[in-house]
Amino acid sequence: MKNWQIKTSLFLNYFVFAILLNSVGTVILQVQNNYGVSEGSASVLEAFKDLSIAIVSFLVSSYITRIGYKNAMLIALGFVTLVCFIMPSATGFWSAKLLFAAVGSGFALIKMSVYSTIGLVTKDEKEHISLMNFIESFFMIGILTGYFIFSSFVDDSNPQSTEWLKVYYLLGAISLAAFLLLLTAKLDESSVRAGAADSSMIDDFAKMFQLMVTPLVLVFVLCAFFYVLVEQSIMSWLPTYNSKVLQLPTALSIEMASILAGATALGRFLAGIVMKKLNWYVVLTGCLLLAGVLVLTAIPLAKGAEGRVVTGWADAPLAAFIFPLIGLFLSPVYPAINSLILSSLPKQKHGLMSGLIIIFSALGGTTGSIITGNIFGKFGGQTAFYFSLIPIGILLTGLFFFKKLQK
């Protein structure tokens, strides 16, 4: 198969970053156990991850073709490999901050490079769409795998143990394997380097700002921001919710958070089928309403879990299975609105729009995690997850105006 080595490398790159990026919920729980960090303080880990993604995406998007896609990915993998190998011996809350700053910065380079490289290693639109879908699916597999990898290193009998940090030796080895595979792979970037833009960072910023203040794009940006706000607040704090509200063992709290990732993957797969036949607005509105109903139904179930002893999946409370299914209803929104905004704009603006998508998604994730963490610390986990109803309501309103402007 032509380009098999570079394609395999793209899969492996996304796999390792899926595990590291979405381990933030697990690490938030563990730093509370190991270092006595409060919920509000632990929530800043999301900011280290997402703000790094936003800043690096903004600064590098104009110059990624000059750096080279392969070089950018090698830089990201090399940096993350080094930090992973440092993590087990660098115990302290600061090391977790360094880790997620490195992972966020690396992922910005990886995502821009992977998306761009797909066009270089596929021969037509059908192959492009197919490879893109396979890579995004592999990202979800990475998330699912990550929960079980991390939980296998957690010692439930000693919550204060830092032995779980040895997981980073394994993740560093996977990242190193991805680095070596990419290093030996051949990638012809001559076509994109020859056409690299000569505009300055200031010019690109001006163009991005002009695009952002367009009414349709402005409404989209708000929708993307609030979607990631609610999704990331739930994903990052679900392990802590399972542990502190449902009183599950730490390892099981992390494992059962995988239900959310599985529900998210299934929701996007089913939506891809349904939206071929039904209007997107009807589908997304229905999904958000069902998500709101699920919040109102599932969170009260947590009260029935108080005081019971849980040792495994078989005797876990119903609430631990029901609430993560919110991913089934929320997940179709983000890829759908991304597709809609890109198809509404001329192709020459897709690069700038992709930059806005990455930046505002990152900002939404940081905001959601910090707000949820502080509510969790002051008012409890149930109140923190009831908060998700507010951005869901804003999303419903945003989609209404998006539909109006799209016409």
Image (cartoon, rainbow, N blue to C red):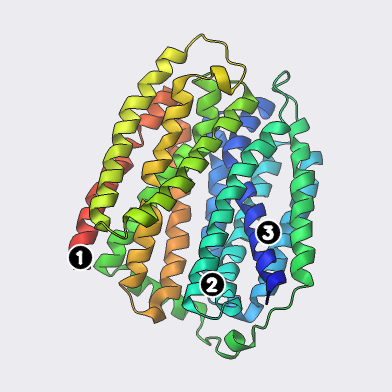
| Residue in the picture at 42% in, 28% down | 322
Residue ID for mark 3: 12
Instruction: Give whichever of 133, 253 is nearer the camera.
Output: 133
Q: Earlier in the sequence, mark 2 or mark 1?
A: 2
Instruction: Give whichever of 187, 266 is nearer the camera.
Output: 266
Callout 3–callout 1 Cβ contact below 8 Å: no
Q: Earlier in the sequence, mark 3 or mark 2?
A: 3
Question: Height in image: 360 above or below 293?
Answer: below
Question: Height in image: 337 above or below 407?
Answer: above
- Mark closer to the observer (3, 2): 3
Q: Residues within 10 Å of mark 1 (few under 14, many from 20)?
A: few
Residue ID for mark 1: 405
Instruction: Give whichever of 86, 184 is nearer the camera.
Output: 184
Q: Picture quarter containing residue 208?
A: bottom left
Q: Is residue 49 left or right of residue 95?
A: left
Q: Which mark is residue 61?
A: 2
Q: Is residue 287 left or right of residue 323?
A: left
